[in-house]
Image: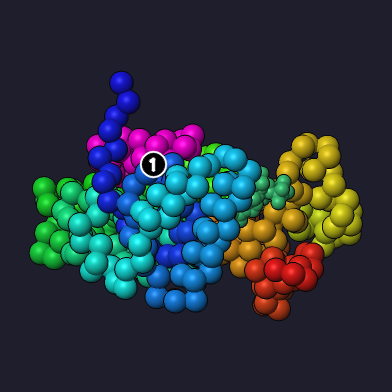
């Protein structure tokens, strides 16, 4: 028998590519009303125009009835603060990768949201255990019943870009995460139409601990002149049937994001195999960040 996720109202913090995608699959597939908050109105506008475009495409391709698209759209509502999320059963945070920022946000969630709300993060490499340690109520210890109950609600739900297309969600348990939180978070991801793979809370989890050294090695190959950009990518597209070569994928993810994950891996393990390449660092210094900045390993004229 499948476990009920019990999410009747969801909050999504951050309306970037990931937050927008998570909000869309939650409203469309899990059919859950979603409250979205982002400090940037520009980000909200961009996110909603992408959602409208994707829903319209699904209708035009006959994969969705217009009424289903309208219903999904009506489940999405922008709110102007986290305070307006006080009744949510789960919040999914999808903001910038910064531990201090996430700890502050999660502390706010613990104070403002219902005591039984699940507090999920879409982080791609930051320790869920460190985030969970931030939600212990003032005056209580981590070992107290209140401390355990509060941090037991924190979990990693790592979606992949583009969220509406990629079939996986990585489920990461902090040391403190309760079984109930894990079961419900898994059930929610499945209701969004995703397959779930679980990982321990290690730097990069399974996905980025494997992907980032691969991308980094491709950049080192380019740096050393082992092969050209196009031949490196062609090798993986045609030789291994990857949808994108590693340099294309790095541009797609964002070179600053790749560097930040690689730094988390390197700092978190002290293992030299994770040391970011000098070329990647220089490209980020130059603000060549991949698709989002119009230049990375490739040029993007119309994006
Ligand atoms: N949002 C939603 N849908 C999108 C999209 C987006 N940003 N970009 C593309 N799509 C959809 C298209 O609309 C199209 O849908 P359709 O079949 O219904 O018409 C479908 O994806 C295929 O798109 P295209 O035909 O334009 O292009 P491709 O066939 O080249 O596919 C791709 C594009 C799906 C991005 C494919 O190249 C791919 O799978 N690339 C690898 C992506 C990947 O590895 N993602 C994971 C990155 S790692 C990560 O996210 C973790 C983080 O922690 C770093």
**Percent coordinates x, y for residue 261 in the rendering:** 56, 59
**In the rendered structure, does residue 288 fall within the stretch colored magenta?**
no
**Percent coordinates x, y for residue 65 in the rendering:** 50, 42
Compare residues 291 and 170 and report the one nearer the observer.
Answer: 291
Q: In this view, does 182 lie to the left or right of 162?
A: left
Image-quadrant location for residue 200: top left
Whether residue 37 is visible here, answered yes or no, is: yes
Residue at 53% x, 42% y is: 64
Count of picture labels: 1
Residue at 61% x, 67% y is: 256
Tell me the quarter of the image containing the C terminus. Answer: bottom right
Q: Residue furthest top?
A: 1
115 versus 242 height, above or below? below
Residue at 67% x, 73% y is: 293
Give, as a single range, the part of the protein colored magenta: 175-200
Kind of element beneath mark 1: loop
- Read off the residue under disc 1: 30
* Colour pattern: rainbow
Q: In this view, does 224 lie to the left or right of 208?
A: right
249 versus 81 height, above or below? above
Image-quadrant location for residue 75: bottom left
**Mark 1 sits near ligand 1, with its Cβ under 8 Å away:** no
**Percent coordinates x, y for residue 112 in the rendering:** 19, 64
Residue at 47% x, 37% y is: 193
Tell me the quarter of the image containing the N terminus. Answer: top left
Neighbor class of circle 1 (other Cα within 10 Å; few <14, some 14-19, many 20+) is some
**In the rendered structure, does residue 179 fall within the stretch colored magenta?**
yes
Whether residue 186 is visible here, answered yes or no, is: no
């Amino acid at each position: 028998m499948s476990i009920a996720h019990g999410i009747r109202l969801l909050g999504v913090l951050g309306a970037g590519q990931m937050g927008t995608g998570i909000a869309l699959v939650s409203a469309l597939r899990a059919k859950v009303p979603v409250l979205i908050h982002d400090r940037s109105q520009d980000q909200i506008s961009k996110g909603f125009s992408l959602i409208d475009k994707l829903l319209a495409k699904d209708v035009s391709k006959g994969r969705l009835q217009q009424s289903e698209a309208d219903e999904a759209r009506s489940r999405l509502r922008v709110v102007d603060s986290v305070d307006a999320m006080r009744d949510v059963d789960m919040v999914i945070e999808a903001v910038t990768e910064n531990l201090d920022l996430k700890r502050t946000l999660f502390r706010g969630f613990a104070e403002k949201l219902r005591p039984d709300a699940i507090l999920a993060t879409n982080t791609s490499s930051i320790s869920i255990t460190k985030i969970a340690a931030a939600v212990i109520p003032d005056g209580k210890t981590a070992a107290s019943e209140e401390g355990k109950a509060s941090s037991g609600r924190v979990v990693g739900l790592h979606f992949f870009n583009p969220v509406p297309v990629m079939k996986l969600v990585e489920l990461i348990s902090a040391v403190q995460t309760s079984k109930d939180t894990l079961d419900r978070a898994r059930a929610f991801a499945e209701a969004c139409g995703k397959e779930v793979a679980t990982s321990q809370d290690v730097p990069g989890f399974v996905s980025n601990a494997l992907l980032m050294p691969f991308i980094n090695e491709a950049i080192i190959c380019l740096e050393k002149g082992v092969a050209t950009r196009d031949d490196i990518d062609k090798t993986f597209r045609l030789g291994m049937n990857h949808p994108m070569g590693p340099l294309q994928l790095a541009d797609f993810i964002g070179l600053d994001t790749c560097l930040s994950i690689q730094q988390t891996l390197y700092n978190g393990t002290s293992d030299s195999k994770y040391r970011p390449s000098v070329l990647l660092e220089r490209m980020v210094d130059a603000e060549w960040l991949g698709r989002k900045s119009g230049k990375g390993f490739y040029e993007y004229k119309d994006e």
